[in-house]
Image (cartoon, grey):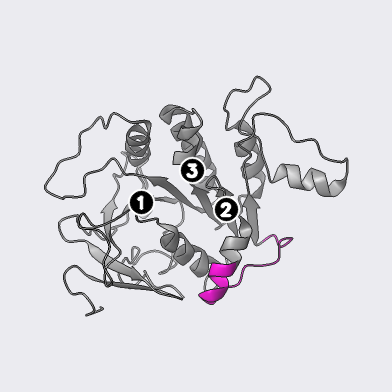
Amino acid sequence: MTYLTPHLPFPSSSTSTSLPPPRSHLIISDTVASPSHFAVYHLVSAALGKERRKVVWIDFRGEGRASWEAVLKKIGTPLPPAASPQFIHFTPSFLPFPIPTPSSSSSSSSSKNTPRLFDDNDQPTLRDTYNSIVPVIAEGSLIILDGLSELSWIGMSAMEISKFVRAVFARTRSSNAILVSTLHADHLPLSSNVIPQTDAGTNEGELLERLLRIGQGCWWRVSHLASGRSGDVMGEISSHPLTKPIGLEDSDKLNYPHIPRSNPLQYRLESNTVRVFAKGTGRGFL
């Protein structure tokens, strides 16, 4: 089920209508009151179902595989078995020390999927995570860096996190794969009439700004309503094409749809889908 594609279409020149083009970066920001999980589920459902692509999920949020299994089964796209190479789940460890485990092939495999986020001096690092991801990035795969804001909460700088994202994106592009990054953006104003400051004064604000500078893709901004949730509307989505760096190949210069904050789409979560509709139409779904 790809319930967002009709409303947030990807460029028509893409080889897929349900996923971003190869060699592109989709940034999804949300707020605590309006999580963007449903948008990520949409992409994973499209990749595993219709597109039959490999998915690599780096779970910085600590959601856990069980929660995804329950949700994706409900929307009609069951996750492959845990040992399947089509879906690889990394859970970077926030513990500042190695976890002692019995010496066995199974524990060795487990440790590879649980890279440490702290080095031997208890300093935060993304080196282990990067080294774990690179070998599994395959041609055309979908790579999801889920929950980058959580890294800033343990003391990582926006510069360090953005350098990690750039490095992963470089490998993604060389493999004709797709990169998706998610993070919180509660610092952004809800009103489209307010111009965001260039310096948001927070690590999350700096991180979002650095990611947007990478360009070569699109930014989906998910946020709650200033008036709060209602029975019909739970939040809003806008879509903003990112810059195209000088020297980018013509084939990569794709036209993403622009859905401004002044006229965003609105959505309501239901038991097994998401209803998306034009602002102000209430139950008059598109």
Nearest-to-viewer mark from 1 and 3: 1
Residue marked by disc 3? 169
Tell me the element at label 3. Answer: helix
Q: Quadrant of the C terminus?
A: bottom left
Residue closer to the observer: 149 or 45: 149
The reply to whether callout 1 and callout 3 are in contact (CB within 8 Å) is no
Q: Position of residue 30 (x, y in %)?
A: 36, 51
Relative height, residue 163 to residue 224 (above, below):
above
Label 3 CA crowd tier, 10 Å (few <14, some 14–19, many 20+):
many
Horizontal side of 9 relative to 161 (left or right) equals left
The residue positioned 18% from the left and 74% from the top of the image is 281
Q: Position of residue 103 (x, y in %)?
A: 88, 40
**In this picture, which residue range is highlighted in magenta?**
70-85
* Identity, as a three-letter code, of the amino acid under mark 1: Asp
Q: Position of residue 237 (x, y in %)?
A: 28, 59
Residue marked by disc 1? 30
User: What is the CA distance from the residue labelled 2 to the residue labelled 3?
Assistant: 14 Å
Horizontal side of 249 relative to 143 (left or right) equals left
The residue positioned 46% from the left and 56% from the top of the image is 22
Q: Quick one: label 1 or label 3, which is nearer the N terminus?
A: 1
Task: Name the residue at the top extreme.
Answer: 121
Nearest-to-viewer mark from 2 and 1: 1
The residue positioned 81% from the left and 45% from the top of the image is 107
Tell me the element at label 2. Answer: strand
* Identity, as a three-letter code, of the amino acid under mark 2: Trp
Q: Which mark is residue 57?
A: 2
Task: Name the residue at the right extreme.
Answer: 103
Q: Quick one: label 2 or label 3, which is nearer the N terminus?
A: 2
The residue positioned 29% from the left and 58% from the top of the image is 256
Q: Position of residue 190 (x, y in %)?
A: 21, 49
